[in-house]
Image (cartoon, coloured by chain):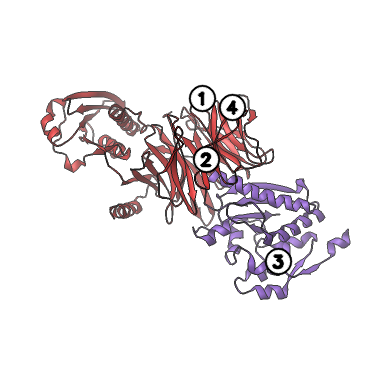
C-alpha cells in the first residue's frame, strides 16, 4: 500500500517536470540503513544556487545508495555550523551515528570554496574534512565527490556517485522514432546527448577509464559498432561486417572489445584488438552465442548461448581452447550477464513464462537468487561499487530505469520525463 | 523462359487464411510504419486475407493469383503482395503456414535475376535485446535458406536484424507481440 502511494506521488510530481532529466524515487527499503544528519551548508557571500544545493545533493545521493537513512531537513534537532557548535550528547540521544556540516563561500573571482566535515558522534570528533574549489558548473560534481568521501569512509566501499551513467532513450512521434544516446550524472542531472538517430541505438558500454562509450548504431541501415569519446565527441567505426555487429564489451584493460558477429554464418563471439584491428574468434557453434562480458581478470568471458536449446550463461577462456562451462541450469531463459566489480557474482535476466526478472548468481556456490519482480526487467549492470544493480524495467506505458540493492531489499525507480529510457550503464570512473 | 514467367495460376489458399498465427487489421498500419516511403501501399497484406475474422470464405472464393512476372510484387491480388512472415516465440523456424509464401518469393527471385530483397528480422520485447537481435537474424536466415532452395541466389538477398528495436505494435499483450515477431520481405 505504502509502495503504491509513493508511486502515485511520484507520478504526480513527475508530470510537472518539464526538464528532461531522470527522476529518482526510492520505493522500497531502508531496512538497516545507517542514520546520518546532513546539516544545510552555510552560504557566505553568495545566494544559494538551486542547481548546486550541496547538502541536498549529498542527502539524495546517500539515500539513493540504500545504505543510509538521512534525516529530513525539517526533522533536524540542531543546525550546528562549526565543529565547536556540535553538541555530541544531544545527537547521541537522537540515535545519530554521523553528522555532516559544511560551508560554501563565494570567492572574488566568482568561484566557490566548498568545505565539509564528517563528524562521528560516538567518537565525538571529526573523522574527515576536505576543502574544494568549485564553479557554478562544477558544484554538483563537487557535491557528488563529497558524497563519495562520506560513503567510502563509513561503508568501506568505493563511492560511485561522482561518475556518470549512459542510457538510450526513444521518443515516438508521427514522424517516426527518434533514439538518443545520453550521458548524465548518476542522479540523472545534467543529461547530454551524444547521438541522435532515427534508427535504433543499442548496448552502450563504458570503457574502464570512463572516457569512451562503445555502442551499436543502425544509422547506416546496418548494425555498426562505434567507440565514442564523450569529451571530444570524436567517434570511430570499429565493426561493420555483414550481418550482426553487436554486444560490445570492453576488456578490463580497455584494449579490446568482445563483440558478436555473424559474418561467418551465425552469431559467434569475437575479440577485436583496438590498436591493430586484429580479430580473434572465441566461440564457434551453430547456435546463438552473444552478450559477452569479461571476467575481472580479463582471462575469460561470460556469455549467452542457446547451444542447449534455450539461452543459458556460459563461461569460457578467451583463448577459446578450453571447453565452455555452463553456469545456469534453473529455468529456460538465462541471459545478459553483468559481472560484479569483485568478480564474485553475475547479475542476469532470468525468464520464466512471460516474466523476466533480474537474478544474481554466486560464482563460487553456483546458487542464484531472484531480486526483482518483473514482468519485463532487462539490461542489468552493477554499480561500480557493487552496492546496486541498475536495470531497465517495463511499466504499464513506459520503460523506466530501476535499481535494486544486491541483497534485493532496496528498490528504486529512475523514470525519464520524456519517452522511453533503457539500457543503463554506470561508468566506473568519471573521466 | 518467357512462357514460364507468364504462367498465372489461381491458388486456393486453403486454411492459410484462417489458421495463421498472425493478425489482421493492424498489419496495414504496420507496414506503413516500417517501410516508411518504400512501397508503402504494396507492402500491405492482400485484400481477401486482410479483411479479418470471418473473411476466410471470401478469400477462398476469390483466391489469389500466383505470377512471377516482374511487376507481380506490386499487384495487390498476387500472392507475392504478402510480404511478412510471422514466427512463434523464441523460434526461428518458418511455420507451415508461411512456407508456401516464402517459396513463392524465392521463385520470384529466381525468375527475376535483377530483383533483390532485404529481409528485416524482428523479435518481440520478451527476452534480452542483443539475444533478440541474434534470434531475429536467424529468423531472416531461415527465410533466406528457403528462398534459396527455390532458386534465389545469395547475391539477391541481404539481411538486417533489428531484434526488438523496431516494433510495429506497441502493446504488451500477446496480439502485439505476435505482430512483432516477424521477417519483412522488402523489395
Q: Position of residue A357 (x, y in %)?
A: 45, 47
**SS at mark 1 in the image:** loop
CB of mark 3 within 8 Å of CB of mark 4? no
Give the number of the disc on residue B76.
Answer: 3
Report the mark closest to the observer, 3 or 4: 4
Q: Residues within 10 Å of mark 4 (few under 14, many from 20)?
A: some
Identify the residue under disc 1: A253
Chain B's colour? purple
Residue situated in front as seen by the camera: A86 or A344: A344
A142, above or below A244, in the image: above
Q: Where is residue B40 in the image (x, y as percent from the top left)?
A: 64, 60
Are marks 4 and 2 in one subunit? yes
Are marks 4 and 1 in one subunit? yes
Is residue A21 visible in the rendered structure shown here? yes
CB of mark 4 within 8 Å of CB of mark 1? no
Report the mark closest to the observer, 3 or 1: 1
Q: Which of the 4 image quadrants contains residue A91?
A: top left
Chain ID for label 4?
A
Question: Label 4, label 2: how many angstroms apart (C-alpha)?
Answer: 18 Å
Residue situated in front as seen by the camera: A135 or B30: B30
CB of mark 4 within 8 Å of CB of mark 2? no
Are marks 3 and 2 in one subunit? no
Question: Label 4, label 1: how many angstroms apart (C-alpha)?
Answer: 11 Å
Chain ID for label 3?
B
**SS at mark 4 in the image:** loop
Question: Label 3, label 1: how many angstroms apart (C-alpha)?
Answer: 57 Å
Amino acid at each position: 500500500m505504502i509502495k503504491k502511494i509513493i508511486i502515485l506521488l511520484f507520478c504526480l510530481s513527475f508530470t510537472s517536470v518539464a526538464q528532461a532529466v531522470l527522476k529518482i524515487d526510492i520505493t522500497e527499503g531502508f531496512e538497516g540503513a545507517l542514520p546520518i544528519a546532513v546539516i544545510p551548508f552555510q552560504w557566505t557571500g553568495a545566494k544559494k544556487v538551486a542547481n548546486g544545493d550541496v547538502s541536498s545533493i549529498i542527502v539524495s545521493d546517500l539515500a539513493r545508495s540504500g545504505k543510509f537513512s538521512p534525516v529530513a531537513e525539517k526533522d533536524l534537532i540542531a543546525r550546528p555550523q562549526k565543529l565547536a557548535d556540535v553538541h555530541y550528547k544531544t545527537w547521541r540521544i537522537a540515535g545519530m551515528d554521523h553528522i555532516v556540516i559544511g560551508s560554501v563561500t563565494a570567492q572574488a573571482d566568482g568561484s566557490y570554496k566548498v568545505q565539509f566535515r564528517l563528524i562521528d558522534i560516538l567518537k565525538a570528533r571529526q573523522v574527515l574534512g576536505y576543502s574544494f574549489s568549485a564553479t557554478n558548473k562544477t558544484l554538483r560534481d563537487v557535491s557528488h565527490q563529497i558524497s563519495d568521501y562520506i560513503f567510502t569512509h563509513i561503508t568501506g566501499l568505493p563511492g560511485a556517485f561522482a561518475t556518470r551513467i549512459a542510457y538510450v532513450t526513444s521518443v515516438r512521434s508521427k514522424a517516426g522514432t527518434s533514439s538518443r544516446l545520453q550521458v548524465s550524472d548518476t542522479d540523472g542531472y545534467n543529461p547530454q546527448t551524444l547521438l541522435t538517430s532515427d534508427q535504433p541505438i543499442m548496448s552502450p558500454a563504458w570503457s574502464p577509464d570512463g572516457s569512451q562509450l562503445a555502442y551499436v548504431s543502425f544509422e547506416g541501415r546496418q548494425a555498426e559498432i562505434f567507440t565514442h569519446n564523450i569529451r571530444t565527441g570524436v567517434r570511430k567505426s570499429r565493426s561493420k561486417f555483414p550481418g550482426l555487429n553487436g554486444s560490445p564489451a570492453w576488456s578490463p584493460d580497455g584494449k579490446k572489445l568482445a563483440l558478436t558477429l555473424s559474418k561467418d554464418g551465425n552469431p559467434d563471439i569475437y575479440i577485436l584488438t583496438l590498436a591493430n584491428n586484429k580479430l580473434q574468434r572465441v566461440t564457434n557453434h551453430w547456435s546463438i552465442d552473444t552478450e559477452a562480458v569479461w571476467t575481472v581478470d580479463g582471462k575469460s568471458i561470460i556469455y549467452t548461448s542457446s547451444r542447449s536449446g534455450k539461452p543459458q550463461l556460459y563461461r569460457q577462456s578467451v583463448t577459446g581452447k578450453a571447453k565452455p562451462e555452463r553456469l545456469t541450469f534453473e529455468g529456460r531463459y538465462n541471459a545478459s550477464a553483468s559481472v560484479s566489480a569483485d568478480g564474485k557474482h553475475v547479475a542476469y535476466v532470468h525468464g520464466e513464462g512471460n516474466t523476466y526478472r533480474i537474478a544474481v548468481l554466486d560464482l563460487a556456490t553456483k546458487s542464484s537468487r531472484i531480486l526483482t519482480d518483473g514482468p519485463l526487467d532487462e539490461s542489468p549492470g552493477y554499480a561500480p561499487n557493487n552496492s546496486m544493480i541498475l536495470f531497465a524495467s517495463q511499466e504499464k506505458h513506459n520503460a523506466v530505469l530501476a535499481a535494486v540493492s544486491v541483497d534485493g531489499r532496496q528498490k528504486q525507480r529512475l523514470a525519464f520525463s520524456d519517452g522511453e529510457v533503457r539500457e543503463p550503464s554506470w561508468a566506473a570512473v568519471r573521466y | 523462359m518467357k512462357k514460364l514467367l507468364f504462367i498465372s495460376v489461381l491458388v486456393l489458399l486453403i486454411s492459410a487464411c484462417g489458421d495463421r498465427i498472425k493478425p489482421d487489421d493492424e498489419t496495414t498500419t504496420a507496414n506503413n510504419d516500417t517501410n516508411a516511403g518504400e512501397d508503402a501501399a504494396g507492402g500491405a497484406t492482400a485484400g481477401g486475407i486482410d479483411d479479418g475474422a470471418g473473411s476466410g470464405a471470401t478469400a477462398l472464393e476469390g483466391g489469389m493469383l500466383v505470377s512471377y512476372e516482374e511487376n507481380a510484387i506490386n499487384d495487390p491480388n498476387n500472392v507475392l503482395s504478402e510480404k511478412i512472415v510471422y514466427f512463434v516465440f523464441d523460434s526461428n523456424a518458418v511455420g507451415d503456414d508461411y512456407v508456401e509464401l516464402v517459396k513463392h518469393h524465392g521463385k520470384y527471385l529466381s525468375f527475376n535475376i535483377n530483383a533483390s530483397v532485404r529481409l528485416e528480422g524482428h523479435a518481440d520485447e520478451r527476452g534480452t535485446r542483443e539475444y533478440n537481435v541474434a534470434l531475429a537474424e536467424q529468423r531472416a536466415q531461415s527465410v533466406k535458406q528457403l528462398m534459396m532452395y527455390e532458386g534465389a541466389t545469395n547475391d539477391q538477398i541481404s539481411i538486417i536484424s533489428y531484434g526488438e528495436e523496431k516494433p510495429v505494435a506497441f502493446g504488451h499483450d500477446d496480439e502485439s507481440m505476435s505482430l512483432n515477431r516477424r521477417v519483412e520481405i522488402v523489395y
